[in-house]
Amino acid sequence: MSTATRTGWAEHALGKLAAAGFRRGGARTAVVEVLADQGCAVTAFDIEDELRRRGASVGRASVYRVLEQLEEIDLVHRLEVSRGVAGYERVEPGGEHHHHAICRECGRMIPFEDASLERAIDKVSGRMSFDAAEHEVTIRGCCERCSA
Amino acid sequence: MSTATRTGWAEHALGKLAAAGFRRGGARTAVVEVLADQGCAVTAFDIEDELRRRGASVGRASVYRVLEQLEEIDLVHRLEVSRGVAGYERVEPGGEHHHHAICRECGRMIPFEDASLERAIDKVSGRMSFDAAEHEVTIRGCCERCSA
DNA sequence: ATGACTGCAAAGCCTTTGCACGCAA
DNA sequence: TTGCGTGCAAAGGCTTTGCAGTCAT
């Protein structure tokens, strides 16, 4: 994934936020910029940590509020990364996305993507009298490192 | 799904628990019996509620403890049914299982199953140098009832 | 100027843990 | 008899909410 794509996402997100009537606050922009640089799901804690590292002082509540707003307008996808902990990752405007294999031992997340898997999901969705907006696939087990 | 299958699961579960070295306590048995009767995922709250309805007095902590043990030996599958709330459903010894479409509006869960989806997941897992034990697919969107 | 945006601290909510008593084996 | 199993109440941990000050427009 190129840096160009990530930078593009920040602009895309800020534009969509503006279009949705949100103002361009400091906390909001900072969180968007952090998310733009992440390749896979990160927790609210990870984001707070990265913000601090970047010197931005953003309150915890703001992080959660921004994430909620971003999720609301489909700019980020929320998923459970470990018992009771949410992870967030950006949604690409083009629709490309990946899924995750999560290790039960160490919690490591291995992203993967597969065209035929997507096709199968699309077909099922199509048959379902349910207006599908998104989907997620999670494989749980033991990663290479922990199996050894 | 037949009642016979459900009854079978309770026996199966109690047997597997015994084999794992657990004693046959009242709370444990009661929770297993409730789970055996559920067709789809239920929350800890649902279980507590059903136990009360059945006249069994089981402490909240015991419900969670039993669920954790059942999950540990792969007798139940845990998933997130709504923000921060876990749902549990029994795992069939035969391996047959379903996935869920969850309505963002009302939270309703619509179960579905699809052979080609399973095949696609198996293939991906096979390619992954990851010891896959289970998987789950969640489709999110708007159900028929809420779209109207 | 006006109402959205933020940070801080407090509250919420589901879940887990500590502890003493009861029960299975 | 032994120590697992259980209920109750308290603690935990992530997330959300209330509120007053600040900033974008």
Image: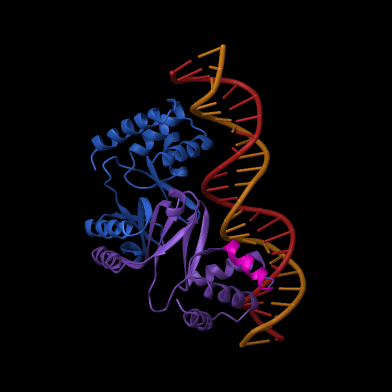
Chain colours: A blue, B purple, C orange, D red
For residue C21, above or below residue A67: below
| Quarter placement of the N terminus of chain A | top left
* Main secondary-structure element of the magenta-colored stretch: helix
**In percent of the image, x 48 and y 37: which residue is there?**
A63
Q: Toward the viewer: B92 or B54? A: B54
Left or right: A148, with A43 as reference point: left
For residue B29, above or below residue A37: below
- Residue C3, image x, y percentages: 54, 23
Instruction: Say which quarter of the image contains residue A123.
Output: bottom left
User: Would residue A48 be visible to someone looking at this image?
Assistant: no
- Residue B117, image x, y percentages: 29, 64
Range of magenta residues? B44-55
- Residue A8, image x, y percentages: 28, 33
Instruction: Say which quarter of the image contains residue C21.
Output: bottom right
Left or right: D9, with B12 as reference point: right
For residue B80, above or below residue B51: above
Q: Toward the viewer: A138 or B106? A: B106
Q: Is B52 a magenta residue?
A: yes
State the residue lying farthest toward the front. Answer: B148
How many marks are shown on the rendered structure? 0
Q: Toward the viewer: B87 or B127? A: B87
**In percent of the image, x 38 and y 75: which residue is there?**
B95
Left or right: A5, with A106 as reference point: left
User: Would residue B55 be visible to someone looking at this image?
Assistant: yes
Q: Toward the viewer: A90 or A47? A: A90
- Residue D10, image x, y percentages: 71, 55
**In percent of the image, x 42 and y 34: which residue is there?**
A31
| Quarter placement of the C terminus of chain A | bottom left
Q: Is B70 a magenta residue?
A: no
